[in-house]
Structures are given as C-alpha cells and as structure tokens.
Image (cartoon, rainbow, N blue to C red):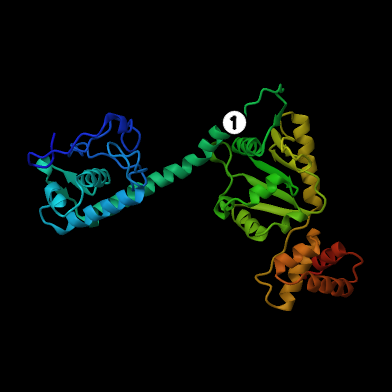
Amino acid sequence: MSTTGSSRTTPEPDPADRHPGTPDGHGSPGSPDDPGSPDDPGSADGLGRPGSGTQFAGWTGYPDDELEAAVTRVYLAVLQHPQPSRSLLVAHGIREDLVDASLHILAGRGLLRLRQGGHLEVLPPDIALPALAANLERQARATRSAAHELAQVFFQARAQTSQPETGALRVLQSLDELAAATADIISSASERVRSFRSLSPRTRELFAAPLHSHSAPSTGAAGVLLEMVTTYDSSVLGIDGALQVLEARERGGERFRFAAGIPFSAVIVDESAAVVDTTQYDDSRSASVLVRSRPMVRALAALADLFWDLGSPLSRTSSARTAESRDQTILALLATGAPDATIARQTGVSQRTVERRVRALMDQLGAGTRFQAGVQAARRGLI
C-alpha cells in the first residue's frame, strides 16, 4: 500500500533487515509503505524515542541521533502547515525513508494520526504532549516499582551453585549472591531487621549506591514498614561521603550507632533468617552464608543487640564552620572510636589540627583516652 497519494511508492526493505517485532518488541513489524493507520498507529519504546536506530521496525541503519533529529524536524514541519501530508514533507527535502520512520514514531507517541492518501491529522500539542508525558511517567513508575523484583530474578538465577547445601545454611559465592540473599530475607521480614557492619567489600558497595536508594523506607512482607537498627564499625566513617549516606539512611527510617572492632557483618531478620558477610577475610569474596537455623539466627540477633548496647550514636551539628561546632563534631566522632584521619576527613581540617584539638579536649574533660573524651562529652551534654 502506498501512502504518497501518487504513483511513486517507497521500496520495501529487505526482509533480512527487519526487526522481528514492533519498537516495543511485540507484534509484527511495520513497513515504510504502511507507517500505520488510525486504529494502529504503532508504538514507541516507552521512553519517548524509538529505541536503537538499527532495530526500529522496518527501518535499519539509522543512528539514534539522526533518527531523533528527523522526528523533530518532521514534527515541527507538520505543526507549521494547516494541511500537512507525507508528500509535502518529502517536498521539503526530507528523505522519504526518514519521513516514513518519523511519521510512524510520531503516531506511536500520539502526536498525530496517519490518514489515507498520506494525509496527516496533527493533534493539538497542548493536549498531545501532556498526554505523552503522563504516559511516560506511568511507564517510569512501573519500571521503578519492578526494579526490586526483577533484581531478585536476576540475582537468584545467578545464585545457583553445584555445591551441596542444607536447608539451614547456604554458602554465597559472590557479592551479587550476598546482595540478593540480603534483599530476599528483608523482603520476607514481618517486624524488625537488626544489622551490624564491618568495613567489608559489601559495606563499601552498599555505601557506593545512589543516595536516593538509601532514603527509601524498608518494607517487608505485605508491605509492612520495618524497624531497622544497625551498628556500624567506626571505620565505616572513613568512606568518602559516609555522613551523607548515613543521613539518607536515617531519612529512610534506619537508626544506627557506632562501635569499634566489629569483626564481620550480619543482617538478621526477625528470628527467622540471617546473612553473614565475612568477605573482608576472603579475597575470593565467597566467604558468606545464608543462615536459616533458628538457634544460629537467635545467637546472631543476641550479638547484634550486644553491639547496639555497646555502640554510641553519632551526634551531628548543623555545620563545622565555628571552632565550637567543630569541636562538637570531633567529640561526637571520638565517641564512635573514629581515628584522626577519619575525623579530619569529616570535619574538613588537617589531621594535625585534629590531633591538636583532640589532646586539648581530652585535657579539658579530664579523659585518659580518646573514647573516654567522647563519653564524657556525651554525659555532660556537650554533644
């Protein structure tokens, strides 16, 4: 079928060049001679663009930027003419194959309708564009909501191992398996998640995640909001941007404290399951385990409670611009057991300045150790 309204037709592309579906991966491909109909205008890829130029239905070999530029040019041209048509666009000097591809895309986006004889019905932009934006926003929300579930499918498919395992313990072979197992048990929680974390490769990976992922509240079975409590080893504060990550996690509902010398990491869900992370002791990063033995889970929960009781909260001031607020920050970090290098990084001063202020603060508080200085400051309400 020709859409030109003349005897000239667009050559049919070689079948070997066709993509096996429409731009969204479903149904039969279109063709340049039939860019669509009022009842079947085609579809975009859900991202407001046709996808890869080499895979667009019926038209191959276009780089994304070239095809998108043609779409923009065609759309602006049809907006400026009261009775636009395909032949008019070709007369403007746009290649016929690009005209057909662009019209198909614009129809898929709901910006125009293709009529018989190559005539075009352009929808008012103040109606069509907001509708397109709303559709893209719905698809974006659906994509984000599916991310967690699809990640579980991805990781679980890669978590298969030929090593024998029991129902109570399963060895985790990689950081991916460790992350998947942790997310899996948290999603099945009904009340509380206890954690303690050392400065392990998995902890570093966790802190490197985007901030928005930390601020999202944690939900368990049936969407119940979980109580999240974590004791971090003080060395975690040495990670670049650690305070920003912790603030984001706090916004997401996590309560945390700090303690020195936490030997490994664990995440304990209720009293039903736990993931133990000992990757800091194994360069192969396969030294972790999923635990479903109730006595072992309860023992890990008791250890998590012990670390929490021994830990110190991190009292934060609004800024460290003044000497007083800087000293408060130094004392708060001292109470967590943070070393001078970490304190210097978090306060933005030199390590030598930190060492000098720590000695002065210890003298003022009558403390014999750095940790005692932090504890004394907390007792006196200085932090």
Q: 313 or 73: nearer the eye?
A: 73
Please, what is the three-letter code of the amino acid marked with disc 1? Arg
Reply above or below: 161 against 56.
above
Residue 187 percent coordinates (x, y)? 59, 37
- The residue lying toward the viewer, choosing from 303 and 329, is 329
Q: Is residue 202 left or right of residue 63?
A: right
Task: Say which quarter of the image contains residue 11.
Answer: top left
Q: Quadrant of residue 51?
A: top left
Q: Is residue 18 visible?
A: no
Dividing the image into 4 quarters, which one contains the C terminus?
bottom right
Location of the N terminus by quadrant is: top left
Q: Residue at x 72, y 64 (%)?
A: 315
* Horizontal side of residue 34 vs 117, given as left or right: right
Q: Which residue is mark 1?
A: 158
Say whether residue 272 is left or right of residue 54: right
Residue 21: x and y, percent?
32, 32
| 14 relative position to 174: left or right | left
Q: Residues within 10 Å of mark 1 (few under 14, many from 20)?
A: some
